[in-house]
Amino acid sequence: MENLQTQNGLNNKKAVNHTKTRYYILAMIFLVTALNYGDRATLSMAASPMSQELGLNAVTMGYIFSAFSWAYVIGQIPGGWLLDKFGARKVYFWSIFLWSLFTVFIGFSNIFGSTAIIISVLFLLRFLVGLSESPAFPGNSQIVAAWFPTKERGTAAAIFNSAQYFATVIFAPLMGWLVTQYQWQSIFWVMGGLGIVISFIWLKVIYSPVNHPSINPAELQYIKDGGGLVEMGETKAENRAANKVKFSDIKQLLSSRMLLGIFIAQYCINCLTYFFLTWFPVYLVKERNMSILQAGFAAVAPALCGFIGGILGGLVSDKLIKMNKSVTFARKLPIILGLFLSTSIIICNYVSSQAAIIFFMSLAFFGKGFGSLGWAVMSDVAPKEMIGLSGGLFNTFGNTAGIVIPIVIGYIINSTGSFNGALIFVGIHAVIALLCYLLIVGKIERFELKKTSH
């Protein structure tokens, strides 16, 4: 009997190893997230020739940069509700398709003769891109919570989150080359067209674990036993639960000290992200006298370091869990260490060589990547009934930085004629995020909604 049980255990283990469907799902999320960040960065890569051709100053460009985030923030809670109601597969498809379509349209914005009209069109189209992208990261969080057990979730979340850096490795040289060889409009045509194609591939690849055609029962059970929420918002029962979400539930989330600490920290962490996505290429061109093509290639090193840091942060966090460390310790340690390293961005004010600039930027982005476990934390703490909506709130706080940072940095540059104050401003936010996890968040555990009477 003992031999039979041992054999059954081996067979079950073999069966689990036979299907690795969750890794194909993760690869698709990674690809789409890389595209997502590539499309966000299109405007920054086109900014120098565009502003020169259209006569746009730093403050005007700051407002155009911020248009994406105004809409992205506004769309987070509705986007999260849609994900909880209809599931990530359908909602995310429309998200990819629409943001790609509006990106293509940006490439035609210069056909309007008046500068004032062009500025309005650019703002509107970037606003629509941001609105369309708003379900993306809450959707990633919902999919990872469904497809991965807790002990693998940190790595999975780190991998999709690290796609933001990998996007620069892939797309920044391509976009720099397109501007140099053709014109700034070509960036938007190529990136938007690629996204439209990928949106239809998404429908062929993404399903919930319970509905996926290639998963076997052993892998499904493994995910479920490990804490995976395998229905991913696609069952009627879950849809009914989503329809019952009330404002009082949102109020509960916002009254949690743990969640508020996580939300505020994400805002501060995203300050570094949005500096990189908006003003970093301009910094290299105008402050460090690089050509646009050089800036495209120079952005690769910090992005690659951020990517490596992001993967390592997730691996270290999950390794600590497998060593029977608490989820709190396993998530917080990489976050705190990474945020400390990311303050090295300020050192760029005190060095002059281009090599030193790239080194300290790379160190800062390695640290930022290593500490970017916010989405893993959200997969750990979000109430089961509100994975999408909780992710939406988290992203609302985080991406408010996309509104504030481009505009504030635009004013700093306009008033001082230098990026020095901007780098200090960004570095201070890394310190605040570190203090949030040290002093405010406390124990990391799944938040339980209190039932309220109807």
Image (cartoon, grey):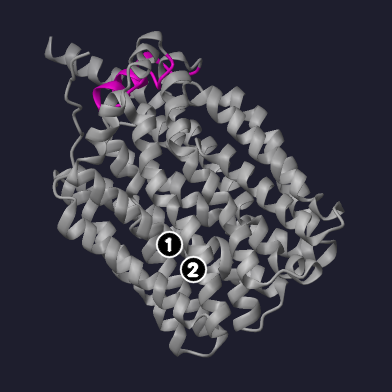
Asked if the residue at tag 1 contacts the one at tag 2, i.e. Cβ–Cβ closer than 8 Å, the answer is: no
Residue 35 falls within the magenta-colored stretch: no
Task: List x then y, in percent, for residue 214.
Answer: 49, 18
Image quadrant occupied by the N terminus = top left
Q: Nearer the viewer, residue 149 or 338?
A: 338
Query: What residue appears at the point 68 percent right and 46 percent down from the top-left corner?
Result: 125
Total numbered badges shown on the rendered structure: 2
Q: Can you say which quadrant of the picture contains the C terminus?
A: top left
Q: Is residue 322 left or right of residue 366?
A: left
Name the foreground residue: 397 vs 316: 397
Q: Is residue 12 visible?
A: yes
Name the residue beneath numbered marker 1: 271
Disc 2 crowd rating (10 Å Cα; few below 14, some 14-19, many 20+) is some
> Relative to 255, is 295 above or below?
below
Label 2: element kind: helix
Tell me the kind of residue under disc 2: Val
Query: Which of the two discs, 2 and 1, labels the residue nearer the N terminus?
Result: 1
Question: Residue 198, image x and y in percent?
Answer: 66, 35
The residue under label 2 is 408
Relative to 47, 17 lies left or right: left
Residue drawn at x 18%, y 38% is 445
Residue occupying the point 21% across, 50% down = 330
Of marks 2 and 1, the one in the foreground: 2
Give the quadrant of residue 56. bottom right
- Which amino acid lies under the numbered mark 1 shown in the image of this protein? Cys
For residue 309, above or below residue 390:
below
Q: Is residue 218 magenta?
A: yes
Real-space Cα distance between discs 2 and 1?
11 Å
Residue range in magenta is: 214-234
